[in-house]
Image (cartoon, rainbow, N blue to C red):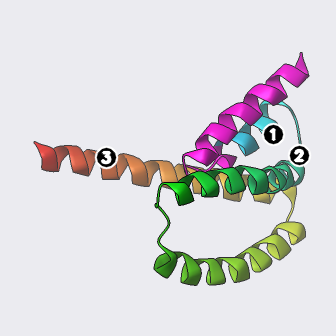
Amino acid sequence: MSIIFYLLIGLLSGVLAGMGMGGGTILIPALTILMGVSQHFSQSINLVSFVPMAIIAIIIHFKNHLINYKIVLPVLALALVGAFFGATLANDVSADLLKTIFGVFLVVIGVFNLYKSIKLEKSND
């Protein structure tokens, strides 16, 4: 039965990743909470699975002319530097701290998006 859950988790995270919404927001909590995979392994699985998902999404977005290279290139350059430091830091912290940091990140993003959508609703009225 667990293989079915892994497949469903993969499908759902792939849909979100393809939409540019971050498949890891589903993949990491689902693997850690539902499947009992450690935080470090869950984040590593997320990174490995992200590469082929991103390639497919990039091809589709490229075909639809939705990539602005003037913005992408500078963001990408600094994101690579950040990824190096983030991966190094993730290896040096405990799984519990990593889990807490990821949880706080998700809550902050959720509150921000809720605030933004409420503000948008009020401006449309």
Q: Nearer the viewer, mark 1 or mark 3?
A: 3
User: Magenta segment range?
Assistant: 1-25
Q: Residue 57 location in percent, x, y?
A: 62, 51
Which mark sits nearer the N-terminus, 1 or 2?
A: 1
**Mark 2 crowd level (few <14, some 14–19, many ≥20, 10 Å Cα):** some
Residue type at mark 3 is Ser
State yes or no: discs 1 and 2 in contact (Cβ < 8 Å). yes
Left or right: where does residue 88 sit relative to residue 67? right
Mark 3 or 2: the one toward you: 3
Q: Position of residue 34 (x, y in %)?
A: 79, 29
* Residue sitting nearer the eye, 16 or 72: 72
- Magenta segment, principal secondary structure? helix
70 is within the stretch colored magenta: no
Q: Where does label 1 land, which residue?
A: 32
Position of the C terminus, as image quadrant, is: top left
Write down the residue under mark 2. Answer: 38
Mark 1 or mark 3: whose residue is earlier in sequence = 1
Query: Which residue is rendered at x = 75% and y = 53% of the image?
Result: 50
Farthest top residue in view: 1
Mark 1 and mark 3 in contact? Answer it, CB < 8 Å: no
Q: Label 3, on which residue?
A: 117
Residue 87's spot in the image, x, y percent? 81, 71
Residue located 71% across and 78% down the image? 80
Residue situated in front as seen by the camera: 28 or 19: 19
Work out how far the residue at label 1 is from the one at label 3, CA to CA, in angstroms.
29 Å
Q: Quadrant of the N terminus?
A: top right
Residue 5 falls within the magenta-colored stretch: yes
**Residue 24 at what x, y percent from top left?**
69, 48
Element at label 1: helix
* Residue at figure coordinates x 55%, y 60% from the top left: 62
